[in-house]
Image (cartoon, rainbow, N blue to C red):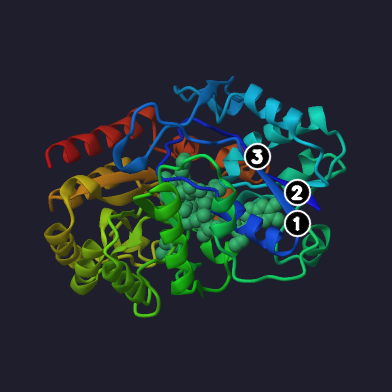
Amino acid sequence: MKILVINPYVTDFKLYDEWMHPLGLYFLMDILRKNGHSISYFNCLQSYSSSPRKHGTASFNFTEISKPALYSNIKRKYKLYGKPIGEFRDFLERTPGPDLICIGSMMTYWAPGVLETIKIIREKWPTIPVVVGGIASRLIPQFFKRHFDKNCFIGELSDPMTLTLLEIKERPEPSFLTAFKELRKPINHGPALLSLGCPMRCSYCASKILQPSFHYRPVELILQEIEFLIEKFGVCDFALYDDALLYNPQKVFIPFLRKIIERKYKIRFHTPNGMHLRFITEPLLNLMTEAGFTTFRFGYESGDKKYLQDTSAKVSCNELEDKIGLIKKYCSDKDTGVYMMGGLRNQTPQQMLNEMDYVGSMGIKVKPVFISPVPGTSLYQYYLKQFPLLERDPLWHNDSYFITCLPDWSADAIEAVRERAKNINYCL
Ligand code: B12
Ligand code: SF4
């Protein structure tokens, strides 16, 4: 079949290109290609950089759009991120009609961007089958189905119906190589993925739902992907997309680091998705810095005893000082930070501020993030009792919005958290 693969538009208040890539779609393209289909690809979310930004990061084009009524109290602009719609229409105009269209999906609250993408496609091709897959489609299939026409379907690679629809007979270990071979435009940065899934189960995280078993990717394949991007595009910045990069590092991570060091590449690695603080050790940090790890983000969320279960005890308060001491020995202050979470059960802004002060006092940057209640997680179930509309409308899951619904979390309180982080980080 001729299959058109599309990375859709995004609707949100904020979107930064922190080394973003639609990895799930890259894998899908590889699987489709290996099953004999011919693929074309359009990335509505192509980033651009008028001038080079730090470590290959860039910006996204956007158009301000009217705010959904639910967000009327949020004093921020609401945007449709992605290429000008005219460019997408032009692409569709000059593309011969495919047999099928596959669209990805990521954050649940970006669903309006997926629907907008389908709407534009439907202007040109009212009946060509469209399959929507990826993270959001698996977390909120019912929402999508309510908005689909009769030729739109949810696709999941573990579902036999999807395999039949996409004529997939073979499921080899997928790789990004196919997708990057298709790309003609230069890219500023590349993804790297060593494993899928996570053996822990934090109360706010859907990793276990999306990837029920932990899976290591073959080291040789990961190295081939990195080498290809270095040779074809001169990429020198790579972001790790793993959920649990530091878990059981002897298996893949350490062999990977040793090979990278051996090959003497001049590249940098970044970990925008926080790493598990408890698993960091001195030998590991030593290898990581030697291999070119530059941006270090750690998941701490909260050290308060009452949240140990929620956070899978990322690290206890007692251990924190030792771990931060180690990190400071190896990592540069400016590119290192610890994620702290706001919006846990009965957490007050003051508790979060106190924890931020405590972590900041150890001389490390704090990165506040707010909860996004993700369907299927235990924290979502807890909040669903107070906010039944969470189930009906994924806009409720937006991290910038949901926190404003919690008692005590006024706009001023949220601003105070952001300001405190700025002050702590400025002084470092
Ligand atoms: C890497 C990552 C990030 C990266 C960037 C992601 C990117 N695309 O560039 C960073 C660190 C920036 C990030 C940030 C955030 N993230 Co995040 N992130 C992830 C993570 C760990 C991995 C996603 C991934 O690439 N997986 C690997 C690919 C290969 O898998 P996949 O996409 O599932 O694709 C597979 C299949 O689905 C299928 N497939 C994919 N597309 C299609 C299409 C079709 C048609 C078909 C048939 C199949 C198919 O093919 C693949 C086969 O293996 C997920 C957790 C997870 N385990 O999924 C969270 C996750 C998506 N993030 C989440 C959250 C909450 C956030 C933040 C809001 C955190 C915060 N509070 O600040 C921010 C918001 C970012 C923003 N810009 O606003 C939530 C989702 C929340 C939601 N409501 O939807 C998740 C699920 C984690 C969680 N808490 O449970 N994130
Ligand atoms: S350790 Fe990270 S990836 Fe694993 S369940 Fe917790 S938040 Fe999710």
* SS for callout 2: strand
**Relative height, residue 81 to residue 282 (above, below):** above
What is the x, y in percent for residue 284? 24, 71
**Relative height, residue 58 to residue 317 (above, below):** above
Choose between 254 and 428: the one closer to the eye.
Answer: 254
Please name the residue shown 33% across and 33% down the image: 52
Q: Do labels 2 and 3 touch, CB within 8 Å?
A: no
Q: Is mark 2 within 8 Å of ligand 1?
A: no
Hey, what amino acid is under mark 2?
Answer: Ile
Tell which circle, 2 or 1, labels the residue nearer the N-terminal end. 2
Q: Classify residue 112 as left or right of residue 153.
A: left
Check disc 3 and report the residue beneath it.
393
Check disc 1 and report the residue beneath it.
37
What is the CA distance from the residue labelled 3 to the residue labelled 1?
35 Å
What is the CA distance from the residue labelled 2 to the residue labelled 1?
7 Å
- Ligand 2 shows up in the quarter that is bottom left
Question: Which quadrant, please, contains the C terminus?
Answer: top left
* SS for callout 3: loop
Please name the residue shown 49% across and 23% down the image: 73
